[in-house]
Structure formats: structure tokens, C-alpha cells
Image (cartoon, rainbow, N blue to C red):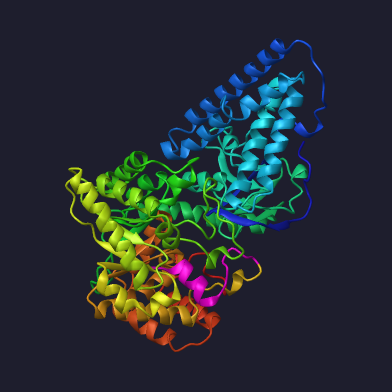
């Protein structure tokens, strides 16, 4: 039915899952079957019941393989591995065997399924760990799919219009594959966070997504017109013509922009007065590689090694890590790839290495974890070094350094790994080593740190968060998180000055570097390279190619005298507007206009 026609426009606020905007028709995907209402039932023919269950498992297995194959051309093997998680759960060693055990006590298959799935879901949902809590939805999804087979009722046959916006109480990776390719323009999940598998996949596939939209009366929105704003995490139901026109323009502009920006791919990023500004990318998912190259990246400023760790069920071995790193290094060769050593803790956690803390951002994270577990750090470093054999385009970056003592300890371990690898006959030079400046303490020790490394890289997201004492994932204080705050600008300027005084290059990676307006200021400060997500790279390039470095420096000097972040925003917007550069101001940074 097309309920909800003619209701007036409403806005719902959730969490951004994947950037972009979409205008389309809502298609609500209800869970295939309801486990909670399955009754207990005693059976006598246990063999027959086991047979039924086995058939259901085979059915779901085949579905998962088919979905994985269907998404094969949109995803790299790493991301498709998320479907292997499902297959693994169905294994004899996992859920499958527990359910079989319960059936053998004389309980019918549906009842056994409900019992085991409920136990697992309850156990997951009690966990403090966001990543693990998300796994509860995977188990629920599997349970429902098995139940649908046992009840012989296959997928609800949904009709997918062009411009489908897929909505579910709990989107799962498997659901993404159900929509015919080319029809899916947006995703909305009532539950879940930006950390979920679906959000990771949506970013890899470039689909605008909003998560955690808890207030959405989703059972009533099927078939209505809807807008998904993945930049701000907002959804509009029954949008007025005016609003639809506005967003259709944003969507069209993005499209035109990327067509126009494609033309810049092979052009260097050079200002009007001849200043050359290297633009690098941040990567993690392998889907990022192709996108980065399509957009003309000159290197990788930050490869997040957590991703292979996060989509695994245990610590990946040296051999597994080597293969993943090798692929990344050869994909970008001869351009440099900066691999950050494992940076878990904070809001990034591993299911098989739980960290329970009251204050995770001020707790055990980044280098602190790996120095306390040198075996993890050594295995990873050895894998990186071996992966770079014959390519020699590796750079290693150390996260969350707060002083020289940690740096010395890490350098010692890197040298040890290098020695071991060479003794084993792998001939690799010592790669350049860098330190991330993201803790305020490091800002004030830039000189001392710079003396001991080859390069520095500012992590603007965490640095802003720590300087302003604002957790950027907390909606209550999110508006205080502002990388154009005068304190942040001063800190950045000091880091560049101190690093250059020691003759060391300094780059910056983080959302700020990918904001074209902010990039103008970072260039003026003297950063040697900017690293950003691939989507923003062409926009930043376009902006910097339209401006004089001298003009950017004047603008920076003027903004450095202002003590109010709001005024800094509006002055920056105005200055760029006057230069005719307003079209590249990203919607998220224009919050004051």
C-alpha cells in the first residue's frame, strides 16, 4: 500500500552512516520471520527434524553465497568477507551445532533455533562494546532467515522502484544485496551506529546512509517519498516540493561535480601562483583503492590497519596481514603508502580483544595497547616490512604518542622487527617513520618528537576532540566540536612551525583536510601534504587550484585574530564567496550560513 500520501513533511534525526544525499521512494524491508513468537514443541522423529534443519542451513548458505557473488563487482574481497562471518556462524562449530544439540533433546527445529539465537543475542546485547552489540543484529538476521526456510516462506517479494531508499528496523549486510543493482540510492536503519558492518559497506559502495533513526515510525512509511541526508544524519518524510527540489539540486550538483572534477584527475594540485600542494588519501577498506586512483590521489597519507582486524574473528596472522598490506602497497606503487600501526580503543574495538573502560577516549588506545602487547606490534610491523619488499613505498605512522618515551620504545620494536625480517632474508630498507600529533601533549613536544622521526602527521579529528574536551560521537556536545576553533588553529600553526624548524615535513589527515574551505587555511599554514577521504579529494583540488597562496595567507592571518569560532566560519565563507569559490563549500561545514 502507499500509505502516508499527503501527510505533511516531517524531519527525523539519526546518525550519519555514509555521506551523500538521496531523494527517492521508501521501501521497508520487514524481518523475514518473527522468532520471538515461536512456541516450544516436542518431537519424536529426531532424525527427520535434523534433516529439516540441515536443509534450512543449506538454503541460507546458498543465499549468502549468491548475495556475496552479486555484490562481487561492487566490493573487494575484504568487504565481502563480511558475508563469510555469516557463513562461519552457520558452521558446525558455531550456531549450527548448538541448535543441533537442542534438537537432539526432542525440541522441534524452530524452537531450538529460537532458544539458541535468543541466548546469543542477549549475550551480545549486554556487552558494552559497540562493535559486538552490532553483532547481535547479524545473529538475529541469520535466525530469521533460518526460520523463514523452516516455515517454507521465502523472502517477501518486494518491488524495488528506481531510486529505492531501503529501510529496515535493522539493516544487515545481506539486505543490501537484495536490491537490484542501480536502483538503491539510500539506506536508513532504525537501529545501529556508524560503526556497524552496514555503515562500513555503505561507505565502500558510496550509498548515502542514516543509522540510529529511532523515532522513525518505519512500519508506516513504505511507498512514500523520502529524502536521506547522509551528511547530517537526517531523513525527511513526505518532503514538500520545495525541499525535494533543493535536495534534487544537491544530488545533481554532486553528480555534475564529480563529472567536472573527473577532468581534474590527471592535473596537479597547484595554486594560481604556482604553489604545489600534494593531496593524499585516507584508506582502510579495499574499495577505497579504486576510488582513490579514479580521483587522482598522489599517495596514501593514512592507511587504517584496524579494518582487516575489525572484520576478522581473531587477530589476523602475519601471513594474512602481509597479503592485505601487500595488496595496498602494490595498488599504489610507486606512490607512498603511510600505514598507521594498529589503532584500537576509543570508538574502535575488536570483538576478540574487548577493552572495558569508563573513559575509552582517555584510556587504553593506539600505541598504548600495542606497547603493552609488543607481540601484536611486532607481528604487524614484520608483516608491513615484508609486504614492502621490492616496492619500498611503505611509511609507518605511530598513533596516540604523548611523549618521547613511547616513541623510543616503538622505534626500538620497529628496529627489532626490521632486524628479524632481514635475518630471515627479506631485503628491505628501513622505511620512514612518523608520529601522529593528536594528543595536546604532543603539540608541545613537536620539536623533540620531530628530531627522532622522518615525518609528522596531525590527526585533526582527535586533536580537536582532545583540545576542546568534546567527544565527537556525543550528540549533546557535537556542536562544540569545531576544527575552526581558534585554539585548534593555533595548535596546528605551532606544529607546522616547530616541525619545519627541525627540517621535518608535516602532513595532516582528518575530516578537516578534506573540507575545501579549511584546506585553504591548512595550505596557508604550510602543511606539506593534506590527506583526506577520496570523495573529497577532487573538491579540495578544485578549490586550491582557484586561489593564490598569498591570498590564502592573508586570509589566514586575518582569521587568526578572531576569537570566536562562529565568526571564523562566517568570515571564511564570505571571503571564499567573494572570490567566487562558494560552490565548493561542503554542506556540513556551512553550518553558519
* Residue found at x 67% / y 36%: 140
User: On the rendered structure, is 54 left or right of 434?
Assistant: right
Q: Is residue 322 above or below residue 411?
A: above
Q: Nearer the viewer, residue 275 or 83?
A: 83
Q: Is residue 531 above or below residue 122?
A: below
User: On the rendered structure, is 158 left or right of 395?
Assistant: right
Q: Nearer the viewer, residue 345 or 333?
A: 345
Q: Nearer the viewer, residue 49 or 23?
A: 49
List the single residue furthest toward the bottom. 561
* Residue found at x 35% / y 52%: 262
Query: Can you see residue 493?
Result: yes
Location of residue 302 in the rendering, given as x and y in whole percent from the top left corner: 36, 58
Query: Can you see residue 260?
Result: no
- Residue 444, picture quadrant: bottom left
Q: How many marks?
A: 0
Q: Is residue 236 above or below residue 516?
A: above
Q: Is residue 466 within the magenta segment? A: yes
Name the image quarter holding the N terminus.
top right
User: On the rendered structure, is 307 left or right of 90?
Assistant: left
- Residue 16, picture quadrant: bottom right
Location of residue 2 in the rendering, given as x and y in whole percent from the top left corner: 76, 39
User: On the rendered structure, is 202 left or right of 219?
Assistant: left
Location of residue 216 in the rendering, given as x and y in whole percent from the top left corner: 73, 51
Q: Is residue 405 within the magenta segment? A: no
Region in magenta: 457-475
Name the image quarter holding the C terminus.
bottom right
- Residue 282, picture quadrant: bottom left
Location of residue 99 in the rendering, given as x and y in whole percent from the top left corner: 67, 25
* Residue found at x 38% / y 51%: 375
Amino acid at each position: 500500500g502507499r500509505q502516508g500520501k499527503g501527510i505533511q513533511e516531517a524531519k527525523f534525526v539519526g546518525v550519519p552512516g555514509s555521506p551523500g544525499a538521496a531523494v527517492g521512494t521508501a521501501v521497508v524491508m520487514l524481518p523475514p520471520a518473527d522468532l520471538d513468537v515461536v512456541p516450544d514443541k516436542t518431537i519424536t522423529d529426531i532424525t527427520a527434524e535434523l534433516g529439516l534443519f540441515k536443509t534450512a542451513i543449506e538454503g541460507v548458505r546458498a543465499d549468502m553465497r549468491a548475495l556475496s557473488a552479486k555484490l562481487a563487482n561492487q566490493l573487494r574481497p575484504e568487504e565481502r568477507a563480511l558475508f563469510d562471518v555469516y557463513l562461519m556462524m552457520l558452521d558446525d562449530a558455531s550456531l549450527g551445532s548448538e541448535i543441533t544439540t537442542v534438537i537432539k533433546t526432542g525440541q522441534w527445529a524452530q524452537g531450538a533455533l529460537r532458544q539458541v539465537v535468543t541466548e546469543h543475542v542477549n549475550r551480545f546485547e549486554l556487552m558494552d562494546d559497540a562493535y559486538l552489540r552490532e553483532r547481535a543484529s547479524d545473529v538475529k538476521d541469520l535466525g530469521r532467515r533460518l526460520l523463514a526456510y523452516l516455515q517454507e516462506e521465502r523472502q517477501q517479494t518486494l518491488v524495488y522502484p528506481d531510486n529505492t531508499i531501503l529501510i529496515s528496523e535493522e539493516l544487515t549486510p545481506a539486505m543490501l544485496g537484495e536490491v537490484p543493482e542501480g536502483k538503491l540510492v539510500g539506506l536508513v536503519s532504525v537501529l545501529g551506529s556508524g560503526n556497524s558492518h552496514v555503515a562500513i559497506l555503505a561507505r565502500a559502495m558510496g550509498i548515502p546512509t542514516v543509522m540510529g533513526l529511532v523515532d522513525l515510525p518505519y512500519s508506516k512509511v513504505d511507498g512514500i517519498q523520502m529524502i536521506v541526508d547522509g551528511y547530517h544524519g537526517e531523513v525527511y518524510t513526505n518532503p514538500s516540493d520545495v525541499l525535494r527540489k533543493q535536495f534534487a539540486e544537491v544530488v545533481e550538483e554532486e553528480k555534475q561535480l564529480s563529472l567536472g572534477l573527473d577532468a581534474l584527475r590527471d592535473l596537479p594540485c597547484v595554486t594560481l601562483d604556482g604553489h604545489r600542494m600534494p593531496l593524499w588519501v585516507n584508506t582502510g577498506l579495499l574499495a577505497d583503492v579504486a576510488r582513490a586512483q579514479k580521483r587522482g590521489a598522489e599517495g596514501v597519507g593514512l592507511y587504517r590497519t584496524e579494518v582487516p582486524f575489525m572484520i576478522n574473528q581473531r587477530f589476523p596472522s602475519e601471513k594474512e596481514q602481509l597479503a592485505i598490506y601487500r595488496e595496498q602497497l602494490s595498488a599504489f606503487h610507486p606512490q607512498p603508502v603511510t600505514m598507521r600501526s594498529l589503532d584500537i580503543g576509543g570508538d574502535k574495538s575488536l570483538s576478540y580483544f574487548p577493552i572495558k573502560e569508563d573513559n575509552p577516549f582517555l584510556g587504553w588506545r593506539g600505541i598504548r595497547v600495542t606497547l603493552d602487547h609488543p607481540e601484536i606490534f611486532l607481528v604487524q610491523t614484520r608483516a608491513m616490512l615484508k609486504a614492502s619488499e621490492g616496492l619500498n613505498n611503505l611509511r609507518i605512522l605511530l598513533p596516540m604518542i604523548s611523549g618521547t618515551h613511547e616513541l623510543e620504545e616503538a622505534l626500538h620494536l620497529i628496529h627489532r622487527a626490521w632486524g628479524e625480517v632481514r635475518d630471515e632474508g627479506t631485503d628491505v630498507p628501513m622505511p620512514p617513520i612518523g608520529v601522529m600529533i593528536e594528543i595536546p601533549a604532543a603539540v608541545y613536544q613537536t620539536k623533540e618528537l620531530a628530531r627522532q622521526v622522518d615525518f609528522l602527521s596531525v590527526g585533526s579529528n582527535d586533536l580537536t576532540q582532545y583540545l576542546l574536551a568534546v567527544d565527537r560521537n556525543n550528540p549533546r556536545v557535537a556542536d562544540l566540536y569545531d576544527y575552526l576553533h581558534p585554539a585548534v588553529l593555533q595548535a596546528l600553526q605551532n606544529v607546522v612551525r616547530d616541525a619545519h624548524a627541525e627540517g621535518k615535513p608535516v602532513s595532516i589527515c582528518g575530516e578537516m583536510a578534506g573540507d575545501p574551505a579549511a584546506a585553504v587555511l591548512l595550505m596557508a599554514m604550510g602543511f606539506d601534504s593534506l590527506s583526506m577521504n577520496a570523495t573529497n579529494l577532487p573538491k579540495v583540488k578544485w578549490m586550491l587550484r582557484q586561489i593564490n597562496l598569498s591570498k590564502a595567507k592573508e586570509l589566514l592571518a586575518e582569521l587568526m585574530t578572531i576569537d570566536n569560532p562562529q565568526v571564523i566560519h562566517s568570515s571564511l565563507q564570505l571571503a571564499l564567496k567573494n572570490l567566487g569559490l562558494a560552490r565548493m563549500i561542503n554542506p556540513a561545514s556551512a553550518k553558519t550560513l
